[in-house]
Image (spheres, grey):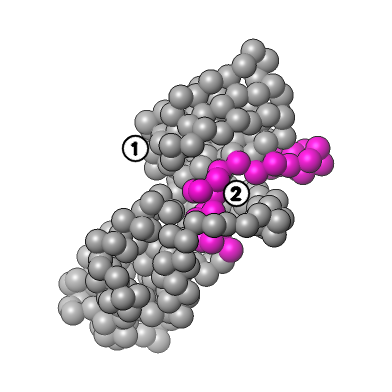
Amino acid sequence: MKPDFLYSTDFLAMNAPELSHTCMHLLCTAGEGSFVFNEKCYHIGKNDLVVMPNPSRAKNLAAAPGMQVEWFAADNKFLGGLLPSNNYSIGGSISLNQNPVIKADDRQAEILLEDLHRLRDRLDDRHLLFYREMMGSLCLTMMYDIFELHARREATDTHSDRTAYIVKQLMDLLSTGISRTEREVSYYAERLHVSPKYLSATVKRVTGQSVSSFIDRHTMPILKKYLNDERLSLTQIADRMNFTSLSYFSRYCAKHLGQSPSDYRQSLQPKG
């Protein structure tokens, strides 16, 4: 089983294949180095933060003598479930796929390092009953600190890549909650007046993720809200979400929640 959380000070290990399911948060604390991501070379130095979904895509890693980094990687799905689907995180992840490096000043870097150390120090507390919830809380603190940095960068940067426009249209459409009943890529392609192939290729190029992953990311909060409402039967939920059958609804839940809808509801009940 792939680990959900990893911490290291080894820059040259940041693109290991076993990190392909994670999002990397790397802070350079001394020296300098470089890497290639999406066919572009990035040079980083002290106080530079790198946020990179699927860091195994980074290539040609090089570290100058004296370079020091600390990084924390967490499962992408775990992180995705921590924030509302229409949060700044989605737009931010698109921008970071185009430029994963954020420059911080000394105080900002100090705050980020504290975030990393809190995660590092609790990494081995897996025996705790609420380990994942605790790690999620610490991850959330770090993510909001990163959002603050990234939002400031976006306020001063301009983007000329017009291919991002189609992605923004898709996100605007998904933010209406339409994925409650519409979860096929072909539906969104038709609404945006492009082919499914073009939409899929554009979204993948701009964000590094699939159209389906964004659809699912917007659908999960809706699904969980319905399952949390005990007044609704599973059949009623399946109908509201436009599933063709209860068995298809159950398979969808098993795939995206890791358990059947009835088991998910059972997990919400107080234990003991």
The reply to whether residue 43 is visible in this rendering is yes
Please give the label number shown on residue 163: none
Q: Which corner quadrant of the image does residue 148 belong to?
A: bottom right
Q: The N terminus appears in which quarter of the rendering? A: top left
Q: Is residue 270 left or right of residue 264?
A: right
* Residue 105 sits inside the magenta stretch: yes
Q: Which corner quadrant of the image does residue 238 belong to?
A: bottom left
Residue 197 locus on image (x, y percent): 24, 61
**How many marks do you count on the picture?**
2
Q: Which residues are magenta?
A: 88-115
Residue 249 locus on image (x, y percent): 24, 72
- Circle nearer the viewer, 1 or 2: 2
Mark sitting earlier along the chain (1/2):
1
Q: Is residue 213 left or right of residue 128?
A: left
Residue 162 locus on image (x, y percent): 47, 61
Tell me the residue that label 2 is attached to. Answer: 139
Q: Secondary structure at mark 1?
A: loop
Q: Residue at x 60, y 30 (%)?
A: 43
Question: Outermost residue toward the right?
Answer: 107
* Residue 124 sits inside the magenta stretch: no
Residue 161 locus on image (x, y percent): 49, 56
Tell me the residue that label 1 is attached to. Answer: 1
User: In this picture, is 81 found above or below 73?
Assistant: below
